[in-house]
Image (cartoon, rainbow, N blue to C red):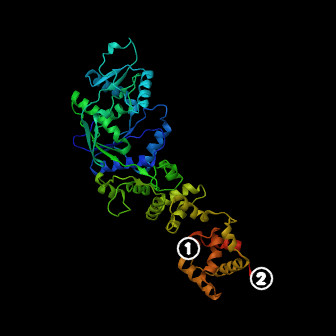
Amino acid sequence: MASDSGKVVTRFAPSPTGFLHIGGARTALFNWLFARHHGGKALLRIEDTDRKRSTQEAIDAIIEGLDWLGLDYDEAPVFQSQRAGRHAEVAQKLLDTGHAYRCYATPEELEQMRAEQRAAKQPMRYDGRWRDRDPSEAPEGAPFAVRLKTPTEGEATIQDLVQGSVSVRNEEIDDYIILRADGTPTYMLAVVVDDHDMGCTHIIRGDDHLNNAFRQLPIYHAMDKIEGGWPEPTYAHVPLIHGSDGAKLSKRHGAVGVEAYRDEMGILPDALFNYLLRLGWGHGDTEEISRQQAIKLFDIDGVGKSPSRFDLKKLENLNGHYIREADDGALAKLVATEIGNKADAALLTQAMPVLKTRAKNIHELAEGAGFLFAESPIEMTEKAAKLLTDEGRERLSLVSQQLRTENDWTIEALEASTKALAEKLELGLGKLAQPMRAALTGTTTSPGIFDVLVLLGRDEALARIDAQAVSPEHD
């Protein structure tokens, strides 16, 4: 599982206790792009050691979300829960060589210790009571946890690719548990062992993990002394994403699962990919960046030190750009899925160039395409119904008569014919187009009225107009 010498290896390591949220998706993206940019390997690890909260549903949602975003991995996912034996093996090596020790402190003793620290307003940390004691002092058969013997003097420094040089005094890191009394490994141990065994050279993650790096380094240092070949990885701790108001990102800002952007908001994967890329990373003033450009341009030195702000409107505007650039057939398939059985993919593909000019999401596209498959009698919006006054219906009758004389059912011919009628009636074109739009689509907003006529076809278009028309003699 170790990496090829000198090759960049990154990993994305989500915990499957919920959906793949925006922050996680961006972390996954930065890891993936960094590996691709440097010709390295991008790996996926599912940190499912919390058996009570980890679910198969969450695992599936994470993998599906990554796949939808187009983030592929170079090896099969590693499941942390399947590696407990290896984690325990490393803990035993640390124990055998004096880099870790058995702690027989009971839960009651530890709670008393914390209570005293709280009362004295001291930092809450393990006081090392079993660090130098002989295990023989413990009652025979008493349960014990294994704690790492961390350095107590000097300081540790990380040259972080984003945060710069960061130092922490070693005395601030207590002797934390690496193996619980029931023999299960803790997160801190499992992460280091897995990162080493997977050959990870660069750890790119949120800056809320920066403190964890200083707790994890002593394991690397100890194991490197024991068996060699445990170099420190290079760290890059990326600032978190905030809401548009500068507060920590929450559901009200859009901190929902990636699947919600796809299903509930109608966002295209390329748009979300591009938007997440620009959240905290920049290349001049460039906004629209393709996948291939991103791979070519991305490096950690472009990541800023300040939290980025999530802006849903910006994402929607960017999504509108990607909709306009997207393949018409591919969009038609997405819209057809939303519309259901009555959708005609060929007709949708034909209509897409005029439907997608203003749409900001797939739902707006589907809504805009609804008139194509509306069944008679056409359901009217309140605004559309107001256009079908007696005068409007009379004008529809005249429009019907005019269009029936037109043999060339094209946009150009229909526009010329309708304009000729408007001039004859001494009306602006809108006075005819408005009731036409209401009769043809049941709405007051649609693609160009002549596009609508062509897309519906001669027979359907005339039938819809006639259904709402009233001849002057019937007045």
Task: Report the mark closest to the observer, 2 or 1.
Answer: 1
| N-terminal label among 2 and 1 | 1
Check disc 1 and report its element: helix, strand or loop: loop
Q: x and y percent of residue 385 in the render?
A: 69, 70
426 left or right, relative to 284: right
Residue 200, quarter of the rendered image: top left
Q: x and y percent of residue 158 in the render?
A: 26, 42
458 left or right, relative to 44: right
* Residue count near mark 2 (Cα–Cα under 10 Å), binned few <14, some 14–19, many ≥20: few
> Looking at this view, is 1 or 332 the one in front?
1
At 40% across and 17% down in the image, what residue appears? 143
46 left or right, relative to 441: left
> Looking at this view, is 442 or 161 the one in front?
161
Quadrant showing the N terminus: top left
At 35% across and 49% down in the image, what residue appears? 30
Quadrant showing the C terminus: bottom right
Q: x and y percent of residue 342 in the render?
A: 61, 58
* Residue count near mark 1 (Cα–Cα under 10 Å), binned few <14, some 14–19, many ≥20: few
Q: Which residue is mark 1?
A: 448
Note whether residue 459 is visible. no
Q: Amino acid at mark 1?
A: Gly
> Looking at this view, is 443 or 407 the one in front?
443
Q: Which residue is mark 2?
A: 473
Position of 301 relative to 395 (above/below): above
> Looking at this view, is 301 or 398 the one in front?
301
At 41% across and 40% down in the image, what residue appears? 14
